[in-house]
Image (spheres, rainbow, N blue to C red):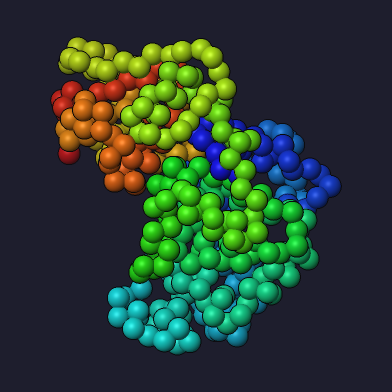
Amino acid sequence: MFAVAGSGKTTLLVKRLSLEKRALIITYTENNYRHLRDSIIKRFGHVPKNINLLSYFTFLYSFCYRPLLQVHMQTRGISFRAPHARTLKLKRDNMAYYATTSGSVYHNRLAKLLETVDAIPGVMARMERFYDEFYVDEVQDLAGHDFNLLMALAKAKIEMLFVGDFYQHTFDTSRDGNVNSSLHADIGKYEKLFQKAGVTVDKETLSRSWRCGITVCDFIRTHLQIDMQSQHTYGTEIIPLANQVDANVVHADGNVVKLFYQEHYKYGCLSNNWGASKGLDHYNDVCVVLGATHWKIYQTSSLAALPPQTRNKLYVAFSRTRGKLYLAPEKLFKPFKTG
């Protein structure tokens, strides 16, 4: 299912869980893992034994790789360091392409290794043996070889649901050279990859936000050209901060989270970074702080022309609010910056 921010992805997923079916759920970011776990506990009072929530790389290494290949491959653990560029020249059947000299498997090539040694059928057999349902939350974060693995696993004969928001693609599970380097460049082509893998694309069920009111959704459509609708009919305020006095008040307000492009911790207030706020659902009023260049672009209504990753992070930031959305140039917060 393709979704918009605040449309109830986690709620829908958790509602589908039961005490009767064995479910495997994977997600990438720590924020989303915590949010899913909290939601499962809220529904059942605990995490039931038949429901297994895993971070993506725990799933990849501990479920897919280790039971099938670790002893045979004689590797030790997983490395999150990027492989040296010279390894790109190695043949794909050379183990040095997949592992460090100390025997740790490169995280960004582990999915490719499963494909190369023809282990994917074995992974699917394990999924079918141990689970009745397979869920992937924040599916847009899967990239590189990891996306190819997911498309292969989609053929397993168990119930599946993948949910995500294409425009909230701010992090990648991994990258490896030009493998799927343009995966998130065009939403139409992205949808077709799922269809080619036999996955039904649903763009309606999660097309309206429960979090954001119509004012913020209109703002996002206008300024970012991302089609976002609201479940609500009420309006909220969008307030550009024009002077230092107003900025000081917002900075001191512990009920307004301030979202910065980077280094939020230097501003001495309740804060986060744009992209890092993804998966957080507890904010009410939000102030998005724009650097000098981004502020000028905003004033000319040209934010949609930003590089996709920057635009997506800004979309995440704008869509955190349930109430007021403040906008401020970073210069008004510089008096508070340290370091």
Given residues 207 and 192, the one toward you in this image is 192
Given residues 100 and 2, the one toward you in this image is 2
Decide: is 304 above or below 98.
above
Q: Is residue 111 visible?
A: yes
Q: Quadrant of the N terminus?
A: top right
Position of 295 with respect to 320 (left or right) is: left
- The residue located at (69%, 68%) in the rendering is 124
Decide: is 117 above or below 190.
below
Q: Quadrant of the C terminus?
A: top left
Given residues 268 and 98, the one toward you in this image is 98
- The residue located at (54%, 84%) in the rendering is 74
Position of 224 with respect to 23 (left or right) is: left
- The residue located at (32%, 20%) in the rendering is 326
Q: Is residue 281 visible?
A: no
Determine the image quadrant of residue 56.
bottom right
- The residue located at (35%, 80%) in the rendering is 87
Given residues 115 and 66, the one toward you in this image is 115
> Of all residues shown, which one is farthest toward the right?
20
Horizontal and vertical percent position of residue 201: 61, 48
Horizontal and vertical percent position of residue 54: 61, 54
Horizontal and vertical percent position of residue 76: 51, 77
Horizontal and vertical percent position of residue 200: 65, 51
Decide: is 106 above or below 166.
below
